Each structure stands twice: as structure tokens, then as C-alpha cells.
Amino acid sequence: MNSQRHSQRLKALAWANQVRSARRATKEAIHSGRIDAARVISACPAELETMPVVDLIAAQYLWGPRRARELLRRLAITEQRQLGRLTQRQRQLVAQELSERNARRGRRRQPEVASLKRPASRGLLPGVADPAGARA
């Protein structure tokens, strides 16, 4: 029984490391313009489900916490709302607003990510995957 708990603990720690790595890599990719924040919000990868939406929005180039909070306040979404807890309508609102703002500012760069679909066992970014059985 004790080894089973130890194994479960190791899987939980591995998953936590995956989540932290995915968040860091995603925020860096958004800041550099390689990934569009609107597409990440629409896709909602498993590793980012518990990430506050305000952190994801603030990761964009020339954005920050204040500007991100103002956007969410205007859309009537609490600033600490987790990405995975957004309703489909809220997800569409935020993604649409970010896309429109980026288009107005001339940032029409296409992300270099082939697909941002939400697979069950693969991460948003290469090399960031769900450890076997850690999410079960």
C-alpha cells in the first residue's frame, strides 16, 4: 500500500512539472509571437486548464496584468478565472476580442503551430506531454 501511494505521489509530481513547463513554454511562445493567445484560449490544452486567463493574456507582447484585467473586466469575466473553467461563450468572447485587437494593431502573424486541438494525452507544445496515467 505504501509503495502505491509513493507511485501515485511521483505521478502527481511529474504531472505538476509538466504543467509548470507547459505554462512557461506557452507564455514564452505567446510573448514572442510564435503562438496566438486567442488560439490557445480556444484550444484550452489540458496542461493549461488551471492557469488563470489573466496570466495568459498578460503574456502577450506589450500587454501586462493591468491591461489584461481591464479586458476581462470589460467582458465580465473574473480575473482569476481558470482557462478550463471558461464557458464556450466566454472562450469565444475573449478569443474574438484578442484577435480583433491584434488585427487593429497590425499583428497578423500566423502562429507556427500546426494544430492546437485538445488531444487527450499530448500537450500544446512539442515535448510537453501527459505522463502515463498521471491525469487519471
Image: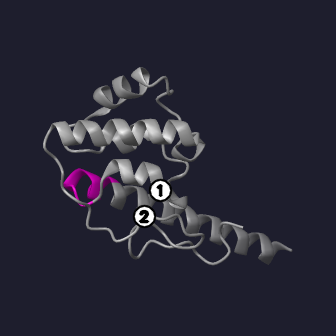
Q: Is residue 87 left or right of residue 68?
A: right
The Cα–Cα distance between marks 1 and 2, rounded to whole angstroms, is 6 Å
Image quarter where the C terminus lies is bottom right
Q: Hey, which quadrant is residue 2 in on the image?
A: bottom right
- Residue under label 2, please give it: 116
Task: Specify start and end residues of the magenta stretch as a single range.
Answer: 27-34
- Is residue 31 shown above or below 1? above
Q: How many marks?
A: 2
Q: Main secondary structure of the magenta part?
A: helix
Magenta run includes residue 111: no
Instruction: Name the residue nearer the viewer: 127 or 38.
Output: 38
- Residue under label 1, please give it: 43
| Residue 84 screen position, x and y as percent | 57, 47
| Residue 123 screen position, x and y as percent | 48, 68
Magenta run includes residue 31: yes
Q: Hey, which quadrant is residue 46 in on the image?
A: bottom right
Whether residue 69 is visible: yes
Res. 121 mark: none
Q: Residue at x 24, y 51 (%)?
A: 31
- Considering only order in the chain, which callout, 2 or 1, is on the residue closer to the N terminus? 1
Disc 1 and disc 2 in contact, CB within 8 angstroms? yes
| Residue 50 screen position, x and y as percent | 55, 48
Whether residue 58 is visible: no
Q: Is residue 58 left or right of residue 105?
A: right
Q: Is residue 13 left or right of residue 104?
A: right
Label 2: which secondary element: loop
